[in-house]
Amino acid sequence: MTAPMSMRWYQEKAVSEVFRLQHEVKRQLIIAATGAGKTIISSEILRRLNKKSLFIAHRDELVRQAASKLLQVWPEADVGIIKGQENEVEKQIISCSVQSLVNRMDQIKETVHLIIIDECHHAVSPTYTKVIDYFLEKNPDLLIVGVTATPDRTDGKELSSVFEQIIFEINMLDLIKEGYLVNLRGQRVDTGVDLSKIKTSYGDFDEAQLSKNFNTPKINELVVETYMNRCEGRLSVAFCCSVQHAIELAATFRAFGISAHHVDGTMKDEERRDILARFAKGEIRVVTNVMVLTEGFDCPEVSCVLMVRPTQSRSLYVQAVGRGMRLFPDKKDCLVIDFAGNTSRHQLVTLLSIIGTTKEQEEVKRAKGITSEDESSGRVNEDIEISTSDIIQQQLIMRAYEAALEEKFQQVETVDLLPKESRFDWNPLPVGYSINLGAGSLCLVPSADIDYPGWNIWAYAKEKDSISCMNLDPFPTLGDAQSKAEELVEKRVKETWMKQLVLKEAIEKKDAVRPEQEEELRRLKLPVPNTMGEAALLLDRFKITEKLLELQIIR
């Protein structure tokens, strides 16, 4: 037998977990970001088991891609396909279209020992459940493994109805940090469309209404002009609102002298494959589509994604931007451009909302001067750029900060984000929040007395290195404590020097780190950030937390 293909460490870990748990967990779920090599993981699972198995997908490209990749991993494999006119039911490993398999299940006479479901966020649909139930009845010990980059669904159905346990997970940021995916850079372009007037259907914007608003000569020309000004000739994929939108946007690109073509699900397989092959060679510079290239499309040369359809679906957004994240020689990053609309009613998914934890996202928004209202509305300054490297840098800062604290104190828990949007620069602590007032700080900290739950306001005086509680009884909620603390701050914020300290948008905070700040940061073994404002927040956060822990105000 040929030696197995060399795998990345996380691919080997995922495969090992499948077999370590195969007798305990019969319905396993693997979550791996786009570009992680899910087909390689699946192929190696099939190779190691070496028994009658099915690989199930819902698109032609995925069925054929899996069969091809399996033969790369395992050249001796007895591989067949069930799709359309192909019906190789006697093969040991069968790559199947679920639509074809559901009508031919009874033709498979041998016992099936393993089913792998690709893009398994589709597995709760009736067609998949019918297939699963049929083969489980034939073999109660059947092992089912689902692989996906995006386990969430817009219809709210839970994958727990099909899968018992997530046995392995690796996310986009992990792969970027490991050097297996390129960095993402995101920019926004405001189209002026009012998304508040577009209804939601099955968890996302109604496609017909989206297309009516976005498929206009004005917006199509805006997309092309943006591409010409910002995308530097990058090989690009545009995600549109409808097939007609994809057709007309491609035509607009061509009218500006840019080689472009659309692909859609009604095309013959040969025609679509020919267009994508020419695209990969660079003969076509832009491909437009609607929901065709979100899965199973592998072209590492792509380095720009044009999101010309706002979405409330995290899975759709992740799948779309993932098309541009694969490694390719001399490719440094993938540029994602959101052609946004304005909305106060819907929660838009953007690049920032799919990377990092909520707290990390808030830290990046603070550094960029983005309010929550800006982020959800689409009215973001078009000069502002969001990058996965911003989140990674924030993780490094927080990790160093927490490590420095752990040298002296025990680990503490985090708390929820502030409930109210604020113009003040609140600094998140491991427990609670603080705001720097120059001679001291105000802190919002949960009560440590279990008999009197709620939130307290503590005042810290730097010169005396002392801290005192400003309220007799705890405030019932964090929002109540925040409101009272901001009343106190408001009384002093009229002074210029105070504005420089407490307001988010203070220009002075963007100045370079001061020498005395850098000296103190290095003394405390903390990383040195880029701006004076970030340095002040980091130092204040460290010293306040140290004092609160020392006095056991937080534990």
Image (cartoon, rainbow, N blue to C red):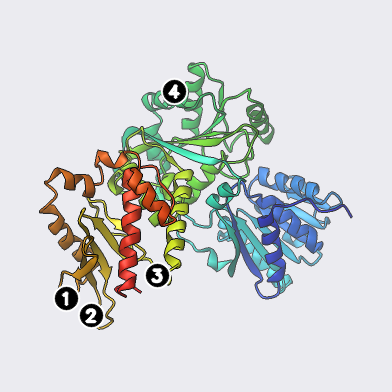
Left or right: 375 with respect to 109? left
- Residue 452's disc is 2
Image quadrant occupied by the N terminus: bottom right
The residue carrying mark 3 is 412
Gap between marks 2 and 4 measured at Cα: 59 Å
Q: Amino acid at mark 3?
A: Val
Is the residue marked by circle 4 packed among few (<14), some (14-19), or many (20+) residues within 10 Å? Answer: few
Gap between marks 1 and 4 measured at Cα: 58 Å
The local secondary structure at tag 1 comes to loop
Is the residue marked by circle 3 packed among few (<14), some (14-19), or many (20+) residues within 10 Å? Answer: some
The quadrant holding residue 509 is: top left
Q: Amino acid at mark 1?
A: Asp
Of badges 3 and 2, the one in the foreground is: 3
Task: Tell me, yes or no, if residue 104 can be seen here.
Answer: no
Q: Earlier in the sequence, mark 1 or mark 2?
A: 2
The residue carrying mark 4 is 229
The local secondary structure at tag 4 comes to helix
Q: Amino acid at mark 4?
A: Asn
Q: Earlier in the sequence, mark 2 or mark 4?
A: 4
- Residue 473's disc is 1
